[in-house]
Amino acid sequence: LVEKKMDLENRFCLIAAAIDNIPNEELFRMAKFYTTALNTGNSSLIKEVIYDYPEKGPAQVIDVPCIRLSQVLEKIDWNRFPVIDCIKIDTEGKDFDVIKSVDPFYEKVIHFRVEMFEQYEKLNEEIIAFLSDKGFELFDKTPGDYKFINNKHKNLGATW
């Protein structure tokens, strides 16, 4: 896994990998990453996100290492940064997998902002129930930007 340190007050660490909910016993897993030349904002680990919408342009496929978000969170100095204000997830269909990969760090997160749309009602219900079980409350259902707050940290977080 390629890791590049960026020395901006020791606040950033660039890791060349995609986030996915891979098994805990694996350090990383290689996967196909689908992107387009015309609209890189729609890159995804899910082939159909690109191939089902040919108007986005020709697909490009690259192999990338995938890690859990918890592997990134393990690197945080929790004495220096006791909580994370917000994790924004917009991963073109892999949002629930990214949320699941946060374990065991849910109590360190104040807010989640997740790309969710009303047409995916069943998946939305699963994500809402999962985060509710982890102690999060849905407080805003703006299409494309559902917002959750950790009930343990309501006193710390502003609700935008």
Image (tube, helix red, strand yellow):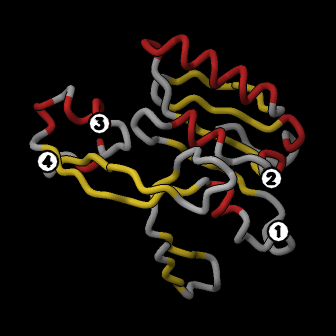
Q: CA distance from mark 4 to mark 2?
A: 37 Å
Q: CA distance from mark 3 to mark 4?
A: 16 Å
Left or right: 133, with 38 as reference point: right
The residue under label 2 is 108
Q: Using the image, determine if residue 63 lies above or below residue 103.
A: below
x 44%, y 42%: residue: 91
The residue under label 3 is 47
Disc 2 packing (10 Å; few <14; some 14–19; many ≥20):
some
Disc 4 packing (10 Å; few <14; some 14–19; many ≥20):
few
Upstream in sequence: badge 4 or badge 1: 4
The residue under label 4 is 38
x 38%, y 43%: residue: 45
Left or right: 32, with 157 as reference point: left
x 46%, y 76%: residue: 2
Question: Whole-percent x and y of residue 44?
Answer: 35, 43
Label 4 secondary element: loop
Residue type at the position of mark 4: Leu
Q: Using the image, determine if residue 94 lies above or below residue 5.
A: above
Upstream in sequence: badge 4 or badge 2: 4
The residue under label 1 is 78
Upstream in sequence: badge 3 or badge 4: 4
Label 1 secondary element: loop
**126, 144: nearer the viewer:** 126
Q: CA distance from mark 3 to mark 1?
A: 36 Å
Disc 3 packing (10 Å; few <14; some 14–19; many ≥20):
some
Q: Using the image, determine if residue 36 lies above or below residue 145.
A: below
- Is label 4 in contact with label 1 (beta carbons under 8 Å)? no
Question: Whole-percent x and y of residue 14?
Answer: 50, 73
- Is label 1 in contact with label 2 (beta carbons under 8 Å)? yes
Q: CA distance from mark 1 to mark 2?
A: 9 Å
